[in-house]
């Protein structure tokens, strides 16, 4: 309507085991597709940070995000960084969803996601989560 500002894209932090970075890249390419039913801004780290500063920089990105998607695989349980990101997102009271990247090869859900919704990766589940985030 007249005088209203257009709604900005939701800022989403994507947490994943480094071994699963190809799936993060795939998710981003899906969202950039013109046929995507929604859009969001990827807030995940694009390059490795020095060990001494990564938690501080990561927390800053999570604080600035509107929600967190955790890409789940067999690697997640052993991914200390991803598990710390989930813990940090909980501390910052961000909406979080776990999303299995493989339908038939899921892996264990880390305890940091206890009480949070965990779904299979699909357009419908992505759209429901992203559109449910209040900005």
Image: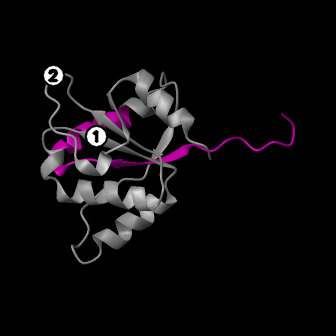
Instruction: Please report contact status of discs 1 and 2: CB closer than 8 Å, yes or no.
Output: no
* Neighbours of disc 1 within 10 Å: few (<14), some (14-19), many (20+): many
Q: In the drawing, does residue 25 fall left or right of residue 2? A: left
Residue drawn at (49%, 28%) of the image: 128
Residue drawn at (18%, 38%) of the image: 73
Count of numbered marks: 2
Residue drawn at (24%, 63%) of the image: 48
Question: To which quarter of the image does residue 119 belong?
Answer: top left
Question: To which quarter of the image does residue 20 belong?
Answer: top left
- Can residue 103 be seen from the camera position used here? yes
Q: Is residue 114 above or below residue 47?
A: above
Assign a secondary structure to mark 2: loop
Q: Which residue is mark 2?
A: 104
Residue 79: give x, y in percent of width and height. 16, 53
In terms of sequence position, does the residue under pointer 1 or pointer 2 come before the other? 1
Q: Is residue 44 above or below residue 96?
A: below
Of residue 111 and residue 51, the one placed in the foreground of this image is: 111
Q: Which residue is mark 1?
A: 71
Q: Is residue 42 above or below residue 52?
A: above
Of residue 107 and residue 24, the one placed in the foreground of this image is: 107
Q: Is residue 134 above or below residue 47?
A: above
Assign a secondary structure to mark 1: strand
Task: Provide the residue span drawn in magenta.
Answer: 1-29
Residue 103: give x, y in percent of width and height. 21, 23
* Neighbours of disc 2 within 10 Å: few (<14), some (14-19), many (20+): few
Q: Is residue 14 magenta?
A: yes
Residue drawn at (36%, 53%) of the image: 44
């Amino acid at each position: 309507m007249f005088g209203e500002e257009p709604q900005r894209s939701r800022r989403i932090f994507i947490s994943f085991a480094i071994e699963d970075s190809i799936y993060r890249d795939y998710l981003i390419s899906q969202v950039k597709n013109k046929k995507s039913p929604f859009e969001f801004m990827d807030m995940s780290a694009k390059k490795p940070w020095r060990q001494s500063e990564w938690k501080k920089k990561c927390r800053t990105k999570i604080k600035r995000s509107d929600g967190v998607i955790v890409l789940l695989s067999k690697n997640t349980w052993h991914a200390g960084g991803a598990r710390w990101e989930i813990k940090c997102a909980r501390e910052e009271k961000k909406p979080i969803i776990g999303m299995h990247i493989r339908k038939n090869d899921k892996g264990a859900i880390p305890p940091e996601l206890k009480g949070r919704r965990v779904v299979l990766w699909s357009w419908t589940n992505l759209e429901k989560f992203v559109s449910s985030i209040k900005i």
